[in-house]
Amino acid sequence: MSSRSSSRLEKRLAANVARASGDFDLLEADDHVMVCLSGGKDSYAMLHLLEVVRQRAPFQFRLTAVNLDQGHPGFPKDVLPTYLQEHGYAFRIIEEDTYSIVQEKIPEGKTYCSLCSRLRRGVLYNVAEEIGATKIALGHHRDDSTETLLLNLFFSGQIKAMPPKLVSDDQRNIVIRPLIYCDEADIASFAQEQQFPIIPCDLCGSQDNLQRQRIKRLIADMTRENPNVRGNLFAALGNVRPTHLLDRSLKSDATATDDTVVSVEQLVRK
């Protein structure tokens, strides 16, 4: 990559990536990280920032950018290879027509996103094994995680979000999210600053994920009333009190305590 001075925004975002790595052991010595590159702002920023961190890390690891061409009509096949070659990244472009499968399986008028994502994930997991990757990096950021928390609460009856590091369901891969401490607004500004050649994610003609858009609007509305809402939501993900929840699998002999609770005996004595 060409040498140049870093912007203040780049330094802040790279520091967030490095901090997340330190907190959750995302990047380790001799890792081979497969960086999933969709052509959106988040994945471009992730690749760029991982390279910045790689150049400054006290240990060695390497990156391979991987893009999956899913056969969407009008997909600009030359954009990503041109960008990656110009910037000196190791990369692979995989062609797999999952678009036709999604069209066949999803009824007209329904969103393609869920099935499309599952098919894409399966292909990428296989590619990670083929290239010997030790980690798979996904471009989900801080806002994605908090939105997913609310989506699961409202629509799935679960308290879970997007962890910074997890083992895939099939136990084959370790998935990491290096942007977990980065705000979407900062990433959007960084993408403009870097003039990434963005490829839109609506080439399939599918609807937006309507539930996620509603959650985005809800958080935006509440943030206008209380500017701490986004920060509080994210802080809650790292401040879990299992003893104050109802999951019976977490049951222990320990009794929950709450200093704000006044017992009947205390009231009687007053």
Image (cartoon, rainbow, N blue to C red):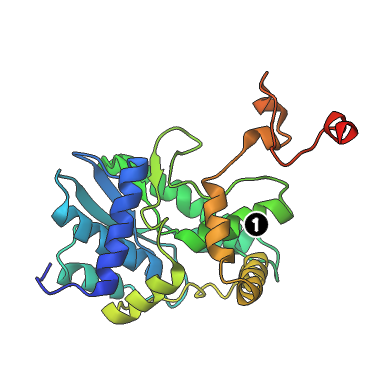
Q: Secondary structure at mark 1?
A: helix
At which x and y percent is residue 253?
A: 68, 18
At which x and y percent is residue 61?
A: 18, 45
Q: Which residue was labeled with disc 1? A: 150
Decide if residue 10 is in sight here: yes
**Which residue lies at the image location 23% right of the left edge and 41% below the top edge?**
31
Which of the pair 118/162 is nearer the observer?
162
Please tell me whether residue 220 is drawn above or below residue 161 in the rendered image: below
User: Is residue 236 rendered to the left or right of residue 87?
Assistant: right
User: Where's the N terminus, which quadrant?
Assistant: bottom left
Within the image, what quadrant is residue 193 found in?
A: bottom left
Which of the pair 237/134 is nearer the observer?
237
At which x and y percent is residue 4?
A: 11, 74
User: Where's the C terminus, which quadrant?
Assistant: top right
Within the image, what quadrant is residue 133 found in?
A: top left
**Which residue lies at the image location 66% right of the left edge and 32% below the top edge?**
243
